[in-house]
Image (cartoon, rainbow, N blue to C red):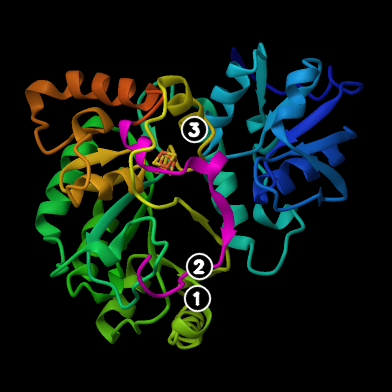
Amino acid sequence: MVIKEFDWISNKNSQVVIYGTTVGGKIIYQCLQNVGIKVDFFCDRSNRYVEFCGRPVKEPSVLRDNKNYKVLNALTRSFDSVCQYMKQIQYKEIYSCSNLIKDKRVEDFIYDENEGELVADFLEKYPIYASNCRTGICLPSLEVFITERCTLRCRDCSHLIPRYQNAKDYNIEEITENLNKISKMVERISDLIILGGEPLLHKGLYQLLEWGYQQKCIGTLTIISNGSVMPDEKLLSVMKETKARIRLSNYGKYSIKLNEIQFECRKRGISCFINDELWTDMGRIYNHNYTKKELTEIFTDCPFSYDLLLLKGRIYRCAHVAHLNNLQIINSYSHDSIDVADIIDENINEKKQELREYMEVDYLEGCSYCNGIKNSIQGIEPAIQGAR
Ligand code: SF4
């Protein structure tokens, strides 16, 4: 299956489908409207919407029965996962929309209040995901886990934080050393996403921001917080200096500092985004004993299968699998991650190749211990406290 650039001039009368009902779908839809292309429907595997931008939303399985659709991939993190799905259902091509959004600015689009950041993110990252970085390796984002400590004990935490006994902070020097090694292997990390646990509990967070800001290959710095801890004065001023942004998960009564943080950020011109998304239930942890075919299907269908996470000197494709290994609940790290702590000048090319191959794997052994999105309950209430 090939990824082609969508040519709107020769496709005026085609049956066009947009895959993805996130903000990217909205942007691509508006671009198509501007060039006079009608959209038949949107596709999405979640059951979140029946209608999006005034068009119907259908399950991706409807594409199996009609291979004449021109399917436009409007997703970023799940771009490859959608391509894998399309290949599986024997589509010969899927379309990228990089040309449609080329030179577009945030203000060219209509979007909901609070979506400005997402639109900017999409415009910056989409072309990277879509081009697949043929010249070098570009990571649209890399999550960095800095602390096991958290203020909450969420029952359905995908990072399994409540299972960490004697939770600890991770050493910032070690983290930057590993990031340094990764930067020898990749051309760019567009968004370095700092998370935990609750990263605002880590006293060395500002050092990581200062370091990250000086690195040429790192683009934006993003902190993910549960909105329960107020950053101190020092951290706020470093966030401002380093142009870091903060994404606050809105867990209602548990996000006790959410309004205060938002107020301080607005006052100081720090980018702050409130995330109201629901969670996905990955299920109880036990070996589902999936067949290889089932594993591949689950992984291909999973929107989290490209969430690269750096944890203790290894890069994992999925945070859930990373923590299952880190907690020694399973032992699949040799298949399910790559070692970056061992990068030296002499093995850079080998390690680049290893990363490329890792990005192509079609399942993680750790997926055996997960419901998988297909079988899971999507849209569950986030941050329910207590044990499972
Ligand atoms: S374990 Fe596999 S199926 Fe579950 S969230 Fe991670 S990548 Fe997806």
The 10 Å Cα crowd at callout 2, few under 14, some 14 to 19, many 20 or more, is: many
* Helix, strand or loop for disc 1: loop
Residue type, numbered disc 2: Pro
Marks 1 and 2: which is nearer the front?
2
Of the two numbered discs 3 and 1 on the same chain, state the one appearing first in sequence: 1
* Helix, strand or loop for disc 2: loop
Q: Vertically, is 340 above or below 163?
A: above
Disc 3 under 8 Å from ligand 1? The reply is yes
Image region (quadrant) for ligand 1: top left
The 10 Å Cα crowd at callout 3, few under 14, some 14 to 19, many 20 or more, is: many
Q: Which residue is mark 3?
A: 298
Pointers 1 and 2 in contact (C-beta within 8 Å): yes
Q: What whole-number distance in Å separates the C-alpha atoms at marks 3 and 2?
A: 22 Å
Q: Which residue is mark 2?
A: 382
| Residue 133, image x, y percentages | 44, 26
Q: What whole-number distance in Å separates the C-alpha atoms at marks 1 and 2?
A: 7 Å
Residue type, numbered disc 1: Tyr
Disc 2 under 8 Å from ligand 1? The reply is no
Q: Which residue is mark 1?
A: 251
Pick the residue in front: 60 or 309: 60
* Quadrant, the C terminus: bottom left
| Residue 77, image x, y percentages | 50, 41
Residue type, numbered disc 3: Ile
